[in-house]
Amino acid sequence: MTAADRDEGDGTVGDDSVGPADSTDSPGPADSDGSEDRRERVDRHPRPHVGNSLGRWYEIRNPLRVAINYAVILVCRMSPSLKLKRILLRRLGVTIGEGVAFGLESTPDVFWPELITIEDDVIIGYDATILCHEFLREEYRTGEVHIREGAMIGAGAIVLPGVEIGENAQVAANSLVTEDVPPETTVSGVPATPE
């Protein structure tokens, strides 16, 4: 069942998108177990102008869309209603399962919220951040974030683009998740590593 099936409307605002296949990235190294790492799931886009890639972000992403995303996410950050947060974030294009709980001040990506998938019964802790983009000097990167069923993201944690967090995995508070987290695993630290 999609977010649109659970909520009225198509779950999107605006019509701009990241766009497929404009990646200039060659595949990064695989993890030691042979599985794909986040660098292989992040699309690299050359900056479209002189200067750093954030300098003229409005050429990359529709400013009205970003403003609407920001306003809706700001309401979600302050609202104690979990149901309202799920409804509003679905309207922005975030795929959200049943029973997902966003703590106060938690922040999904403002530029590309539609790249986030959160399965059933996930907890996103207070002030946690889920990023689907990175603006760098020479390029910007975008990548989907997938948080599997029953996972928990601790307070103040940051999840980077392209990361997958496995079923029933746990990310400790104030951790920086730079790599995939296997199912049933607890990670902590900067960068987050298994405990």
Image (spheres, grey):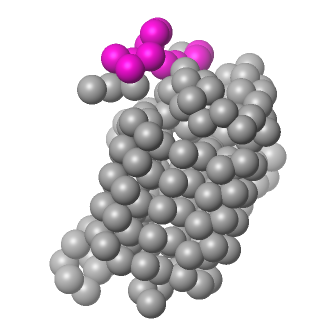
Q: Is residue 11 above or below residue 49?
A: above
Q: Residue furthest left?
A: 34
Q: Is residue 156 left or right of residue 161?
A: right
Residue in front for this viewpoint, 38 or 116 = 116
Residue with the most extreme top position:
9
Query: Residue 44 lies in magenta, yes or no?
Result: no
Residue at 51% of width from left, 54% of height from top? Answer: 123
Front-lying residue, 138 or 169: 169
The picture places residue 80, in percent across and down from the top left corner, at: 72, 38
Give the residue at x 25% y 86%: 32
Examine the rendered structure and indicate whether residue 46 appears above or below residue 62.
below
For residue 168, side relative to residue 68 (left or right): left
Extent of the magenta region:
4-14
Indicate the position of residue 16 as horizontal and vertical percent values. Answer: 55, 22
- Outermost residue toward the bottom? 195
Q: Is residue 83 visible?
A: yes
Quadrant into which the N terminus falls: top left
Residue 115: % across, % down: 47, 40
Q: Name the residue rendered at 45%, 90% in the picture.
A: 195
Up-down: is 176 above or below 112? below
Q: Is residue 25 visible?
A: no
Q: Position of residue 126 (x, y in %)?
A: 69, 57
